[in-house]
Image: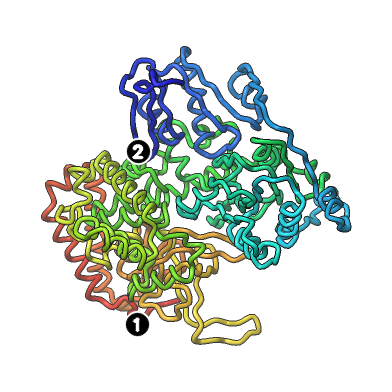
Amino acid sequence: MGPALKHSVGYQVRLESRPPDQSGGALLFLTVGVLLRKLQSNPSLKGISHVVVDEVHERDINTDLLLALLRSSLEENPDLRVVLMSATGDKQRLAQYFGGCPVIKVPGFMHPVRDMYLEDVLTEMGRPLPVPYDAERDKRGGREENAPDLDLVADVIEHIDKRGEPGAVLCFLPGWQDIKAVQEKLEKRRHFSSGSQMILPLHSSLSVADQQAVFQRPQVGQRKIVLTTNIAETSVTIDDIVHVVDTGTHKEQNYDPLTKVSCLDTVWISRSNVTQRKGRAGRCQPGQSYHLFPQRKLESMSQFPVPEILRTPLESLVVQAKIHSPNLKAVDFLSQVLDSPDREAVKAAVQNLQDIGVLDKTETLTPLGERVACMPCDPRLGKVLVLSAMFRCVLPMMCVAACLTRDPFHNSLQNRAEINKVKAELSGSSYSDYLVFIRAVLGWRRLQHAGDGEDRAEYLDRLSLSRFSLRFIKGLISQFSTNLYEAELVPHANACQRDASLCNERSNEEELLKAVLLAGLYPNLIQVKKGVVTKGGRFRPDRTSLRTFSGPVQLHRSSVNRGKEEFPSRWLTFFTAVKSNGIVFVRDSSTVHPLALLLLTDCDITEIVRSDEVEVSLHGHSLVRCMLPVETWELLWELRTSIQTMLYRNLKDPNNAIANAAQDGRLISLLVELLNNTDSNHSDGEVD
């Protein structure tokens, strides 16, 4: 557009901003998340003439929220103009949502792309045709296998390389395991041993450098083959693709609000996804799209993908709804979005937020909730950050929240075995994935201040850490520091990252860190039980079983606690659980001190006096029950009440934390002393 506009154009993304030099007539490129933040303080978008939203067909949860808020902005600000852009979206429905606004079609040039479906591909390869696809059988419940035939995928790629036109191949596969399997199958074949092909994986977990490799131009006579997930549908454009191989499937997250677990399933894509994938070819010359499913299957696919808002947890969305429309019930607010989520799912999200103290019984943000709403992360992680300021251990908790947002390790899917060894070394005897994150990031921070370039390079290499991820994590920590300051929880944003500041006075107390994580993540709790009855009915006393409030779970192989039969405590806390092949896997976990359960959980407690002992349990749940002498429980109850009073007082008015700093310090010291000097595995008198 010319250098004359240089001073009128800027950008703003989550961790970086370069605003235009001049405000009048300026153009600002920004992410949906950043615009949602701006709408909090300027709901009518006064001073803005046009908003252009691209790729609206992707229907992520933030975009759907943005569309609902823009519709309200248009009512308040009739001078505002909103432009929605999409190549494959449901244009008529979007137009209707915005009151019958005009639809403008802008033609663009594209080389012709020839469609070939499974029957065409097999015929060209001289293979027998499959059993005809029966859509009616599919509807009756006889669903066919969604997992792609990876041998066929490799065969088709080899066929293209031998007989197809020159040009790069882009192959869409559901997930990382499929990508690696196809890559290995190709590399083992004699045809691919000559070096005349460049086989490149593309996945969001790969480092930036490895992702950038797909844009390289191959040498003369060499064919580039990119194996990718749906990241290459819209997020990435590789302009020399001529052949697309489409398995017709992708990984999709579906959330069950009853079990509070997400399932990552391989499912069929929609027809608009098929169009998007086909469009990756034909950008530089005529291309071909090899659809590895029957043409009749295309007819039975849904027209558009299931919007994210209908298949993901809604807690973060409900918190945002309370910021934008505090007087509306969450169900009423979310009834205004393009595809309203199920009312029961919304009510379940509200109940979850009430259970963790973010909303009260009237659906109003509590003092805790008002501060959690300042944190740009999952409400439970937001609660961890808020509590870290109360208990003076801010920096390590910011490290945990950042690492649960961005994995600090280098290509962790590719180097799983090596990284598991590194994690075990960092964990030591902590039994905590979160302390692994803290030690890795704080070790890097120390070298940033004191080490030289050689020391830093050796540290990254030895611990398989990603320099780019650590840079992103550093940016997140700075953002969290600003958020904590905006929430009036710390006196200055930079105090959060200073070891000597009051808000980090207890940052080296690892039992306290685990306790604060429990307090924030509860009721995400796992009970560890010795003794397992096998399917054959035999009792195995040395085997360990794990159970949450929703049922049995297993620890994921990426957790440092995977495979351990002995734990220093009978409880673990966790953040992420995913269901796969009928099994719920917990990705990250940490042991929990029993006193932390009794002192820091924000829930009702049930007491049953039995002679000179008390049976104590967390109300409504059977995972935590223990017998205590009456005198001991009375002292613990007094301490629990004092801690809750401190939290309520300081959250209601942050100035109280300054006025009562000495008193609060003594209370935290007592808590730390108890956690450090009592046996976390003491089980005398405990009841299962």
687 on left or right of 578 = left
First-in-chain label (1 vs 2): 2
Q: Is residue 570 above or below residue 580?
A: below
Can you identify the residue that label 1 sits on?
684
Q: Is residue 375 above or below residue 458?
A: above
Residue at the spot 29% in from the left edge and 53% down from the top edge: 387
The one nearer the camera, 378 or 357, is: 378
The one nearer the camera, 241 or 496, is: 241
Could you tell me which secondary element the residue under label 2 belongs to?
strand
Residue 488 locus on image (x, y percent): 23, 41
Q: Which mark is residue 16?
A: 2
User: Disc 1 vs disc 2: which is toward the camera?
Assistant: 2
Q: How far apart in space, not on screen, are marks 1 and 2 (Cα)?
A: 54 Å
* Residue furthest top in the image: 79
Inspect the image, locate mark 1, and give the three-letter code of the amino acid beneath it: Asp
430 on left or right of 258 = left
Residue at the spot 81% in from the left edge and 50% down from the top edge: 121
Residue 153 locus on image (x, y percent): 72, 57
Residue at the spot 54% in from the left edge and 45% down from the top edge: 215
Q: Quadrant of residue 608?
A: bottom left
Badge 1: few (under 14), some or many (20 or more) residues near its Cα, within 10 Å? few
